[in-house]
Amino acid sequence: METPFEAFMADLHLAGRLVQTEAAGAGSERLPERLNAGAPLDVTDLRFVAVQPGDPTETGQLSAATVDPDELLLVVPPAEAQAGYVHAAHHPVVLELGPYRVSGDLATLPGFDPGRALARPSGQFITLKDVRVEAPTADGPFVRRYAVVLVNRYTVERVWSDIDLSFFFPGARHEGRPEA
């Protein structure tokens, strides 16, 4: 079984089809669980576009490739993996990671107090909704919009948010409220 796959690395935008591995079992794991497990992802019909400021845009295609989740900064989950909290409070955030500036809404449970919360994110990837991804390129700004994106929280360099997200994005510099 194959599902659509789209992701961003430090210098590439990837698109292809994610292969369900025998180890995971047919339909046993959704993409977020597979990413957080850290197992390599097998992708077929992989197309890639270089996303680097100042460099000419390069494109390419591979019939199959294996992608390490640790090298992924952002992943766009298929529709069946886009369910979120039913009763969530959404906080606007702006993130910088690699060449990308990502803005969207982070869902937390109602009443979430970051200073007192016992529930900390346990996985490597965190879900944002209503997302805008942008990066400068030689051909002008690269801009994409998505309903949901999974963010590799360990690759985030700067965060703008209305709440303290130190536990969500360790190592990132927190800059205060998002810019309007």
Image (tube, rainbow, N blue to C red):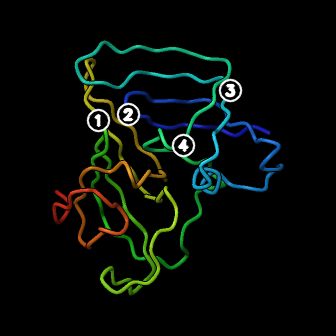
The reply to whether residue 180 is visible in this rendering is: no
N-terminal of the two: label 2 or label 3?
Answer: 2
N-terminal of the two: label 2 or label 1?
Answer: 2
Query: What is the C-alpha distance between the residues marked 2 and 4?
Result: 12 Å
Tag 3–tag 1 contact (CB < 8 Å): no
Front tag of 4 and 3: 4
Q: Residue at x 68, y 26 (%)?
A: 44
Query: What is the C-alpha distance between the residues marked 3 and 1?
Result: 25 Å
Q: Local crowd at mark 4 within 10 Å, few (<14), some, or many (≥20)? A: many
Q: Is residue 60 left or right of residue 137?
A: right
The residue beneath circle 3 is 44
Please tell me whether mark 4 sits on a helix, a strand or a loop.
Answer: helix
Residue 172 image point, x, y percent: 26, 56
Q: Local crowd at mark 3 within 10 Å, few (<14), some, or many (≥20)? A: many
Q: Residue at x 39, y 21 (%)?
A: 50
Tag of residue 62: none
Tag 2–tag 3 contact (CB < 8 Å): no
The residue beneath circle 1 is 99
The residue beneath circle 4 is 69
The residue beneath circle 2 is 10
Q: Quadrant of residue 62?
A: top right
Tag 2–tag 4 contact (CB < 8 Å): no
